[in-house]
Image: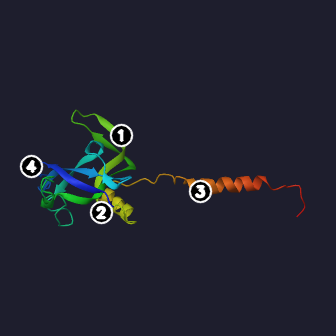
């Protein structure tokens, strides 16, 4: 079962430098966890939230998800405000954030909302596209060695140690 996002808050309509209408929308990720009783959502206190800008008309000429949808209402879930997806954080090329007091910080991670089926093998492609559309290039982290790969490597090493190099071939 895929993770899902719920729209938990939105700002009033604002305009960017190009006079395009947008709202700052907060999404909360509901991660499914495995229990002895099957998959259930994690408690809300353990859920991650983040806010993104959703445009009435984005650069593709389409309305962003979250712009026109209602805020999720637990008393009436059929009303809407729920999406498949996840809040993803990845290492990116370093960039600067300038605070209101003029302080500059160097940052090397970025977090955003990614809509889509988190169980799909293509989800990582959606993550890359979402980061690219926000102007951030994901930096590849070194491949982590799986336990099976480590076990295989250890077995090869121990098998090599059993070979007597002094015997003629």
Q: Residues at badges 4 and 1 in contact (C-beta under 8 Å)? A: no
N-terminal of the two: label 4 or label 3?
Answer: 4
Q: Residue tagged by mark 3? A: 149
Q: Residue at x 59, y 56 (%)?
A: 149
Disc 2 secondary structure class: loop
Instruction: Please tell me whether mark 1 or mark 3 is closer to you in this view.
Output: 3
Residue 12's label in the rendered image is 4
Q: Residue tagged by mark 1? A: 106
- Residue 91 position, x and y percent, is 40, 49
Q: CA distance from mark 1 to mark 2?
A: 30 Å
Crowdedness of circle 3 by 10 Å Cα count: few (<14), some, many (20+)?
Answer: few
Instruction: Please tell me whether mark 4 or mark 1 is closer to you in this view.
Output: 4
Q: Residues at badges 1 and 3 in contact (C-beta under 8 Å)? A: no
Q: Residue at x 31, y 53 (%)?
A: 40
Could one spot residue 134 in this view of the protein? no
Disc 1 secondary structure class: strand
Which corner quadrant holds the N terminus? bottom left
Q: Residues at badges 4 and 3 in contact (C-beta under 8 Å)? A: no
N-terminal of the two: label 1 or label 3?
Answer: 1
Q: Which one is in front, 90 or 42?
A: 42
């Amino acid at each position: 079962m895929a993770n899902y996002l719920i729209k938990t808050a939105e700002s009033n309509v604002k305009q960017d430098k190009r006079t395009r209408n947008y709202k700052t929308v907060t999404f909360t990720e509901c991660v499914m966890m495995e229990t002895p009783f099957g998959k259930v959502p994690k408690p809300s206190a353990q859920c991650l939230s983040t806010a993104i800008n959703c445009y009435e008309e984005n650069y593709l000429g389409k309305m962003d998800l979250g712009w026109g949808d209602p805020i999720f209402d637990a008393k009436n879930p059929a009303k809407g405000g729920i999406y498949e997806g996840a809040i993803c954080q990845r290492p990116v090329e370093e960039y600067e954030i300038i605070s209101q007091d003029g302080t500059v910080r160097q940052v090397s991670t970025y977090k955003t909302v990614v809509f889509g089926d988190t169980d799909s093998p293509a989800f990582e492609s959606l993550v890359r596209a979402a980061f690219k559309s926000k102007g951030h290039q994901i930096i590849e982290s070194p491949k982590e060695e799986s336990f099976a790969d480590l076990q295989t490597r250890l077995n090869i090493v121990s098998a090599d140690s059993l070979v007597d190099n002094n015997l003629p071939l």
